[in-house]
Image (cartoon, rainbow, N blue to C red):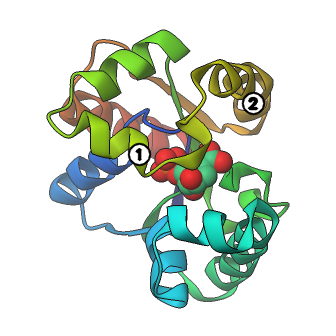
Amino acid sequence: MKNIILIGFMGVGKGSVAREVIKLSDYVSVDTDDLIESMENKAVKKIFADSGEEYFRSLEKKVSHWLEKSVKNTLISTGGGFYKQKNLKDIGVVVFLDSSFDKILERINSHPNAVKKLKKRPLLEDLKKARELYNERLPQYKALADVVIDVTDKSALECAKELLSKVKKHG
Ligand code: S3P
């Protein structure tokens, strides 16, 4: 089993899809934001507020090196900006969860914890800027992807099934 590395914009459902994949397979999962939060003993939002985005990106870099060297047979769910790490392809098969920006907002807003979900993501505070960031990143996510899953109007379970079948075919 190769590592699977899940990339995509904030709120697209990386965590939800990862949870379904581990139910359907022998994979266990880790999440780069969770690793960073436990390293720092602080929420991502607080790391941004106390030390800035650049510091957060340096932690992502540290995590990316550790993943490449030390992690096997694992589904790795990533923060929306983690795709910028240069060794992404050396970590595992890159799977991009694709959705329009409006559908992502719809998904977040329909969640019972919508306010909390928006609040914990500093880069979603200004929706105009977030849309610009989405437009800038979209072609980069696509260019990196070995496998693309269009998540539009699909449940996390459906996405997980599609992911496992496409990753298998990818070899
Ligand atoms: C970020 C996405 C967040 C988190 C941080 C920065 C980004 O993760 O890593 O707030 O740059 O897109 P999610 O994609 O899980 O929200």
Residue at (77, 72) in percent of width and height: 55
107 or 130: nearer the eye? 130
Position of residue 72 in the picture relative to residue 11 (left or right): right
Determine whether the beta carbon of the residue marked 1 sits less than 8 angstroms from the nearest atom of ligand 1.
no
Residue 107 vertical placement versus 71 (above, below) = above
Residue ID for mark 1: 119
Residue at (60, 29) in percent of width and height: 126
Residue 104 vertical placement versus 68 (above, below) = above
Give how far across and how far down residue 56 sits, in percent: 70, 69
Residue at (29, 12) in percent of width and height: 153
Quarter occupied by residue 38: bottom left
Determine whether the beta carbon of the residue marked 2 sits less than 8 angstroms from the nearest atom of ligand 1.
yes
Position of residue 14 in the picture relative to residue 22 (left or right): right
Number of numbered tags placed on the structure image? 2
Closer to the camera: disc 1 or disc 2? 1
> Which residue sits furthest right?
86
